[in-house]
Image: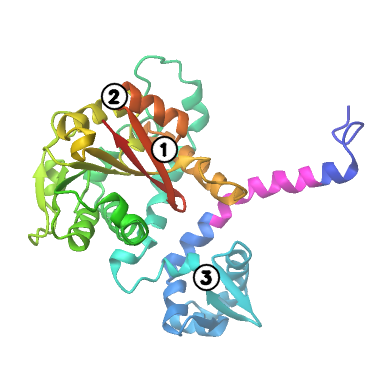
Amino acid sequence: MSCTEQELSTQDMLQGHIDLHHHLYGYHKSMALLCATDLGIPGAIHRRGGAATISDIVADTMIPPAKLPHLRRLMRVLSVSGIFAVEEDVYKLTPASRLLVGDKASCNFSPLVHLVVSPAMLTTFSSLSPWFRDGRNTSPTALFEMAHGMPPWEMMKRDDTMNLALNDACVADSSFLMEIALRERGDVVFRGLRSLVDVGGGHGGAAMAIAKAFPDIKCSVLDLPHVISQAPDDGTVCFIAGDMFEDIPPADAVLLKHVLHCWDADDCVKILGQCKKAIPARGDGGKVILINPVIGYGVKQDSTLKETQVLADMNMIAIGGAEREEHEFKKIFLDAGFSDYRIMPVLGLMSIIEVYP
């Protein structure tokens, strides 16, 4: 049977043809964004007051004039996909590209672009088909490790550029999310706490933001020794070297921001089990605070949000983690001995989840 015969109308088949090609060419958007970030185009537009012509961009980024026609094509892709806006040949920043031009490194998401679209990650997902065919059912190798022969954390130790991109991306993410979380739900989530430990908190961006907003809360950060050794300790928070699988310092609340999605369900239960040991009873204010996507929660009619959440989940396949739906979180919470939870979908892609013993 011909692929255009019978059951589907001509219009349906043509739409299918469009949809297929839209998927096939989708990676060009990511590569165009990486290119624009490398060339400094968002910053060039920002320095021009948020609007620049193509000639302005060529001059400010030192792109050879002979490449101007190709630059127009690059900017067209990024304008159609919402990274830039264009009006009468003047390119402007959008809310998305404004996140790439923070005056402070802590507000600039350019390192995240370099991390997600790095050669290491692209190579990783080139191994997706053989990874699915891998027959080891017990202790399966993570996709990243199959592609590179080592876990991502080991590569971070060996690749200073990738490690720096990860650390800078985490700082920017913490700064961005915590500013909104504290503004929108700070009183609800943090007021009344006497102490908080940010588990896997890296260089302390989230804990420092909480400590500055609520000076009465004693904030600590628990992370691995090689992470803590490089943390900028200014006395705002206490840095503790340790392992969350072995012990978590006692506190009224434990913060897990972008932690559980790095681990499978069994490890999540172990981590939360240690959290439960560290906090008091619910009646005494004990709780675990998660900042993580909850797939489908609060999405309503926002198809872009849902697609982004499931793509984020696909990304976590690389390291053996997962983004989760509410029912998956609920099972993990119950298996770890917690009694209740509530989800606050107030951070766009992310939600704040409070989990109670």
State if disc 3 and disc 2 touch (CB < 8 Å): no
- Residue drawn at x 56%, y 56% is 29
The dot on residue 336 is 2
Q: Secondary structure at mark 1?
A: helix
- The span picked out in magenta is 15-29
Residue 229: x and y in percent read 10, 49
Q: Nearer the viewer, mark 3 or mark 1?
A: 3
Q: Position of residue 312 (x, y in %)?
A: 46, 43
Residue 307 or 137: which is nearer the viewer? 307
Q: How is the image coloured?
A: rainbow
- Whichever of labels 2 and 1 marks the residue nearer the N terminus, that label is 1
* Marks 2/1: CA–CA distance: 22 Å
Write down the quadrant of residue 206 in the picture: bottom left
For label 2, the crowd category at 10 Å Cα-Cα, with few meaning under 14, some 14 to 19 and many 20 or more, is: many
Determine if the magenta segment contains residue 121.
no
Q: Amino acid type of disc 2?
A: Ala
* Front disc: 2 or 1: 2
208 or 346: which is nearer to us?
346
Q: Is residue 202 left or right of residue 185?
A: left
